[in-house]
Amino acid sequence: MFDELSARFEDAVKGLRGENQISENNVDEALKQVRRALLDADVSLSVVKEFVEEVRVKAIGAEVVRGVNPGQKFIQVVHEQLVEVMGGANAPLANVNDEPTVVLMAGLQGAGKTTATAKLGLHLKEEGRRALMVAADVYRPAAIEQLNTLGSQIGVEVFSLGSDVDPEQIATAGLAKAREEGFDTLIVDTAGRLQIDTQMMDEMVRIRSAVEPNEVLLVVDSMIGQEAADLTRAFHDKVGITGAVLTKLDGDSRGGAALSIRKVSGQPIKFIGTGEKVEALQPFHPERMASRILGMGDVLTLVEKAQKEVEIADAELMQKKLQEATFDFSDFLKQMRLIKRMGSLGGLMKMIPGMNKLDDGMLKSGEEQLKKVEAMIGSMTVDERTQPELLAAQPSRRRRLAIGSGHTPAEVDKVLADFQRMRGMMKQMSNGNMPGMGGLPNMASGMGGGGAAMPGMGGGGNPGQVRGGRGNGVTPRRHRPLKKKKGFGDL
């Protein structure tokens, strides 16, 4: 998401290039582009009007210092206003000391409320909190079964009394169980409707009165567009929300909901769902989202994803192998699986500053190269994985590998050549002698070299070539920062 919005913001800045200062004359066209971009992204009209006027006032009055052109200053103003509209800073979930923290999940049917409940349960578990999920959606029997299934997958207990008991009674009984058994958080999954109605709101009010929640989180489908503003207003006026969970941000949504919710309700977005997997829930950081909208990437979230997956021992062993040039195909396979756990290659690349301009064809080519190499590694013997030299020295092994993986001998030869070249390159990078991003993103396009070269990545006619700036440091969890920054290749 946000790709189209990012492109429109870039168009808005073009008219300011070459100017000496921001004035009413040259800012008008830029603001028209901003207005179109926001409306096309399904941001509420009232929010758009207020946003554009705030940017106008701040931009015209802004001082452009030497070395900064008006276009850059305008982007700074837009970035600051985006952050302000989306809440300013991350708003953490409430955490009560002596009583269970009660979180009430609300929203329309189909927004992903039950899945969001499980995602939140897992998130709290990873933070060291003991959560109890309550299945209070009695109108959709599959919801109770779904929550029980998800709970067993993530190891978070689910409380339910079936579908013949009133939701407020289920929530009350769940709270009693949480108090008796020492749960510190209670997450209540409630029923949704296809549209807002009086019965739905009255039931939410009764459940709220029964358990007196510390948080009422409105689960909003990010693909709902401008209706997000009306939905938020209706729930907030009747129930009184304290925050929102924005789901399906990995889809084709235009992102308008992210800019409308806070402005309409005055309450922050607390979490965003970035995929179907139960692990795909992230705390919402307005400044990071603003950077992504403006095509600046989101390095901090990328680093956090890596920290979550990388163990200290693995990172230190990989660093040693890179320095000694003993990195083998088994290590490469581990890094491939690490990237898959972190998300899609395309999604990760767009978190890197400047990589938002990579088109989908390039990213798809990178994904295809990974699959091709994985098939080849799967056809290797244990000795061949750990000793790539065996394949280089014996053509018969390469022929067998080509047949086993369903690729041509020429493709196998190219992968092997690229791997050896890359291993030497990564040794140089680990010693601080070569700029660029190390690791799997380079490998994805460098090995097999099927597509066009990607900025900052190997690929195309010169596999493994590195373009761009230095990689961003990624430190494994519970590990002190290294003095020397290292790319993903050092993990």
Image (spheres, rainbow, N blue to C red):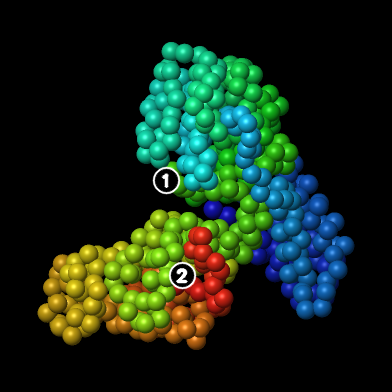
Q: Which of 132 and 267 is in front in this view?
A: 132
Nearer to us in this view, 287 or 179: 179
Q: In this view, does 336 lie above or below 194?
A: below
Name the amino acid, label 1: Lys
Residue displayed at 62% across by 65% down: 296
Q: Which residue is drawn at 44% across and 73% down?
A: 490
- Residue 273 in view in this figure: no
Q: Could you tell me residue 311's position as x and y percent?
A: 43, 61
Q: Which residue is drawn at 46% across and 70% down?
A: 488
In the visual, does 22 lie left or right of 190? right
Looking at the picture, does residue 137 appear above or below residue 435? Answer: above
- Decide: few, some or many residues near mark 1? Use Cα within 10 Å; few <14, some 14-19, many ≥20: few
Residue 64's disc is none
Residue 163 falls in image quadrant: top left
Which quadrant of the structure image shows residue 175? Answer: top right
**Is label 2 in a helix, a strand or a loop?**
helix
Residue extending farthest to the right is: 61
* Three-letter amino acid code of the residue under disc 2: Phe
Query: Mark 1 falls on what kind of element?
Result: loop
Cα distance, mark 2 to mark 1?
Answer: 23 Å
Q: Which residue is drawn at 85% across and 56% down?
A: 57
Q: Which quadrant does the C terminus fall into?
A: bottom left
Return the residue nearer the eye: 324 or 396.
Answer: 324
Q: Is residue 421 visible?
A: yes
Q: In this view, does 13 lie to the left or right of 249?
A: right
| Residue 28 position in % (x across, y down) | 80, 60
Q: Name the residue under label 1.
A: 277
Name the residue that disc number 2 marks.
488
